[in-house]
Amino acid sequence: MSAFEIDSELKSIFLVKRSQVEGRLDPNFYNSNLKKFINARHSIRKISEVVLSFKTGFGVGRQDQEKGTSGIIQVRPTNIDANGFMRFDRNVLIPLELINNQNLLLETDDVLFNNTNSQDLVGKTALHKFVGQYSFSNHITVIKVDKRQIKPEYLWILLNIYQRNLIFYAICTNWNNQSGVSLDVIKSLKIPVPEMGIQQKIAELFEKSLKQKVQKETQAVEQIARIDDYLLSELGIRIPERDDALENRIFTVNFSESSGKRFDPLFFYHNFLDQLPMGRYPVEPLSKHVAYFQSGFAAGKGDQVTDLTEQLDEAVIQLRPTNLNDDRELVFDRNVYIHANALAKRHSDILQPGEVLFNNTNSQELVGKSVLFDLEGDYFCSNHMTRIGTANSLHPDFLAHLLNLYQRQSVFFRICTNWNNQSGVNTGVLSGVPIPIPPIEQQKKIAQTITDLRSSAKKLRQEAKDELEQARKEVERMILEE
């Protein structure tokens, strides 16, 4: 089957009357899913007719960004997730002095439109409801609506529906691996504008769905949070409460304790590894229970499949740190593909089921995130991942959970080496990391319980996702049919 299929609702050959041509001559502009929305039963208006103002932010280079924790967040495309919700796990801070105009600060009910991104992500939109000072980059267009005609919640929902219907994908302009929707195109974009009562019903329906989503995602987070407590309990390890008062941050270490170890103070300050001997199981170096450590390989642009029109099912995914999500599961929304002819040349680099993949290079706080590789088919991994093949005395699933516990307890944060805004743990350091060794059957039991907790959390997240998708479909029906 072809890698691409033509949407059955769209015609590959069609005619447009000259009177209907509006500035653009490319066919995608006139053959997108926009047609079904501008044929809706409601009043069809240009966005500019129901909006008070449009404002695009400004660019800030690295040299002007705030290096510490002061400053204010400049909202960028990475602060808007694929569902149109604000997130603040990857922030750029800028000095307040750069804001020379109050119009460069966000206000409540501002609609934030992502005007520049990859073609499939351009157009994702957020609604600002946060307290405090936030600025926005030149990749964000802030839209202030005329609330007498249109609710900001409705426009936010509608623009995300447009994005998911690939409308912005079709009408954007492409250049240098980027795509964008200009201010003129945004202003002239036609949208259905129901009467305010229907807009209110749509907003209430979506708000109800969001509350259910938040509730289930909170339950999922609670399930994941139980994992470390359960694992520590099974290992008989108790973590004493930390007192970070200034006087406790000044300490001494006997030379005999530091001999053969690191000399930096961070290694010895509240070191989680010091608690291992107090647990119920013997502690031994990881290398004693590992059959092999093997790093992946670097792949430059010349090794990668960069033309995504190729048959990707014949290419090989090279797993990278971005393929591990926050729950330490493999995800495939940002993939790097290697030409399939590398399989014959790199047979020993093909991942094997049952290997533990350890993220050896990342930002300091993320070094050490790990996952059990258990997929069928051929996969590679990058040189930022270390493949660990365990011996019979160490269950790989148990090891993956243990390494993630260590990562969250800052073990790798303390022992990594730092350079050029990157941190790493090499194979020599990793092999010497001490680990508790329960009997193999106990390892399997622990691993299965944690897998069950993860599965429960995953189910809750999927239910939240499905309910939100159902709400979107109902909103789309209300826009098109009521």
Image (spheres, helix red, strand yellow):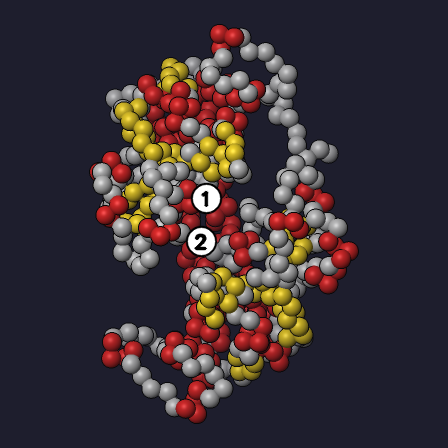
> Which label belongs to residue 220?
2
User: Could you tell me which residue is drawn at 46 percent across and 26 percent down?
Assistant: 476
Q: Which residue is the extreme one toward the right? A: 344
Expressed as whole percent of the image width and height from the top left, the position of residue 317 reads 64, 51
Residue 206 appears in the rendering: no
Q: Which residue is mark 1?
A: 464
Q: Is residue 71 left or right of residue 115?
A: left
> Where does the N terminus fall, quadrant-wise?
top right
- Could you say whether the residue bearing mark 1 is in a helix, strand or loop? helix
Residue 94 appears in the rendering: yes
User: Could you tell me which residue is drawn at 61 percent across and 25 percent down?
Assistant: 7
Q: Is residue 396 left or right of residue 348?
A: left
Expressed as whole percent of the image width and height from the top left, the position of residue 103 reads 24, 35
User: Could you tell me which residue is drawn at 42 percent across and 21 percent down?
Assistant: 189
| Camera-nearest residue between 43 and 439 | 43
Q: Are marks 1 and 2 in contact (CB under 8 Å)?
A: yes
Query: Where, by quadrant of the figure, is residue 245 drawn?
Result: bottom left
How would you rate the neighbour count of disc 2 (Cα within 10 Å): few for under 14, some for 14-19, many for 20 or more? many
> Which label belongs to residue 143?
none
Expressed as whole percent of the image width and height from the top left, the position of residue 321 reads 54, 57
Expressed as whole percent of the image width and height from the top left, the position of residue 302 reads 65, 49
How would you rate the neighbour count of disc 1 (Cα within 10 Å): few for under 14, some for 14-19, many for 20 or more? many
Q: Is residue 435 left or right of residue 125?
A: right
| Camera-nearest residue between 111 and 207 | 111
In the rendered image, the vertical position of residue 317 relative to residue 102, given as above or below:
below
User: Could you tell me which residue is drawn at 51 percent across and 52 percent down?
Assistant: 458
Q: Which residue is the extreme one toward the bottom? A: 256
